[in-house]
Amino acid sequence: MNLLSKPGARSFPGAVRMAAVVVVVAIVLAGASMLPESNPLHVSAFVVSLAGKYLAYAMLALSVDLVWGFAGILTLGHAAFFALGGYAMGMYLMREIGARGVYGNPNLPDFMIFLSWKSLPWYWWGTDHFAWAMLLVLVIPAALAGVFGWLAFRSRVSGVYLSIITQALTYALMLGFFQNGLGFGGNNGLTDFKDILGADLHTPTTRAVLLVVTGVMLALALLISRFVVGGRFGNLLVAVRDAESRTRFLGYRPDQVKLLVWVFSAMIAAVGGALYVTQVGIINPGEFAPANSIESVIWVAVGGRGTLAGAVLGAVLVNLGKTLFTAWLPEFWLYGLGLLFLVTTLFLPNGLMGLWRPMKKAAPEEVTPEVSDTQGDEA
Amino acid sequence: MTDDSLLLDVRDVSVTFDGFRAINNLSLALKPGEMRAIVGPNGAGKTTMMDIITGKTRPDTGIVRFKGRDLTKLDEPTIARLGIGRKFQKPTVFEALTVVENLMLSLKGIRSPFSVLMARPTARERERIAHLLKLTRLEKHADRQAGGMSHGQKQWLEIGMLMGQEPDLLLVDEPVAGMTDAETMATADLLREINRTRSVVVVEHDMDFVRALGVTVTVLHEGSVLAEGPLDEVSADPRVIEVYLGR
């Protein structure tokens, strides 16, 4: 039975190709930035950090696609996990500044001196160690996603209600992080970073390495996501998305199924956020703004929901468009984005990925024509 | 008093929705290996009874025991894992998945999210699926998306998924609604075949179908059992005639 040995319709070859493309592009751009400026192939540091930013956004898009495309959870608050990952990385980068800050205090970041704090809050403990900070990047967003998801899915909150509370979650976090007393720099956030693991953040080499690391992490996230949604678990996610109560009568617990993919997705978003901060050089409460989460949903819709590769494609293309558009006609960008969303919803329900998928699908169907006598067979 | 020789023991169960008594002192006993047909006019409480047995609805009073275990405190997944499978009135298969993928998810065994994540098809599972495809006559459609199949094929796929769960008891809600006569008779054959190894409760309106099953019939009316016995005996009962024709 060859049909049973096949990995299934959802094997996502596009995700593997996209992972390869992302790594190659990151390496090529990073390499080109190392060429002397006189070389015509030289790429500026600006382009390198821009590309790094796009790839970090692509991780956010991928995480949204996992929960929206496969589990049917329309999250409007995923940037919260992205920003939390960013803050965890930001804490480490602040501690790396050490005594080189404006106030020259080796233990306290500038904003704490400014607030006349005498010592670090307890939750800053260990953030001078890179490994500990990276653990926080993963654990804090995962824990928040775990608690939030457990409560929401167990109470069978779904659909638009769930979307609204995800939005409320990120909005509440934004308001919280604006508070100086929370110990994350308030309005200004965390910035003025000097170096990472002893390497100066402002040198072309560090930037090139960070771009490649972002590309590799995105590729890794794509491959792990493909493993998660490509097999039986992916089928179960789709089953939960389309007929949740039916899965209960088969003996599955849809709340646990959703929780697993939700937490995993939050961790991908967090890693994206951490890498984003290293390349953008700042993290502030604005990253929690509801608009950011909504934009990430648009990236996925444009690229193609439920395709993995489409999320990456959508994130990169829409952000490229945003960069160009805001340079030429800054006041019209939001209209452009809205129009893009409308056009996608109306004419491209499967996004850009939908443009070439039907063409590929058509081929095998011609080889095996539809059997017309099924009814007769059964009787 | 409970009888441990019974597979399913529903006793004096009542449930009220907003003052409406959907089930009223209902009792139903099923022996291991038995097939039972449940008939009754609309609103008699047939579907609510299935909801109570499968954990979707909690009874206000009464006992529901399956293999000696009290079901009234358990949720749907737990009851499903204990060995009760349910087929809904409207065929509910996973439309975006293929026939094989639908059957794969139904197979008894792996249920926790982490083990599903790590699961790879085993030789035994492939064998089971091949068997189910044969049983439901869907071999030719194995790789088709379930959403694109005919109503009757979906009904059969859902019965196949029910078999995949290897339940001790199958609750089947109106399996032949919307089927052709030929499909109806084939479904009766299929259920009789299934009944050789499992107990079955079938809710159905179609009297030709119930006759073809040739089993004990329970007539529900206004949430209680009105009559019970062979179809000919029950259909001759004046109270049953009154309920079906008298209004």
Image (cartoon, rainbow, N blue to C red):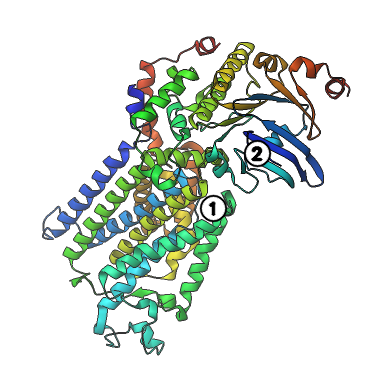
- Residue A359 in view, yes or no: no
Which residue was labeled with disc 2? Answer: B53
Secondary structure beneath dot 2 equals helix
Tell me the tag on residue A153: 1
Q: Is residue B243 above or below residue A336?
A: above
Image quadrant where one finds the N terminus of chain A: top left
Q: Chain of mark 2?
A: B
Residue type beneath disc 1: Phe
Tell me the tag on residue B43: none
User: Quick check: B246 left or right of A360?
Assistant: right
Q: Which of the two residues, A154 or B162, is positioned nearer the viewer here?
A: B162
Q: Which of the two residues, B92 or A278, is positioned nearer the viewer here?
A: B92
Give residue B43's position: percent from left, percent from top.
77, 32
Give residue B138's position: percent from left, percent from top.
47, 19
Q: Which of the two residues, A145 or B199, is positioned nearer the viewer here?
A: B199
Q: Quadrant of residue B236?
A: top right
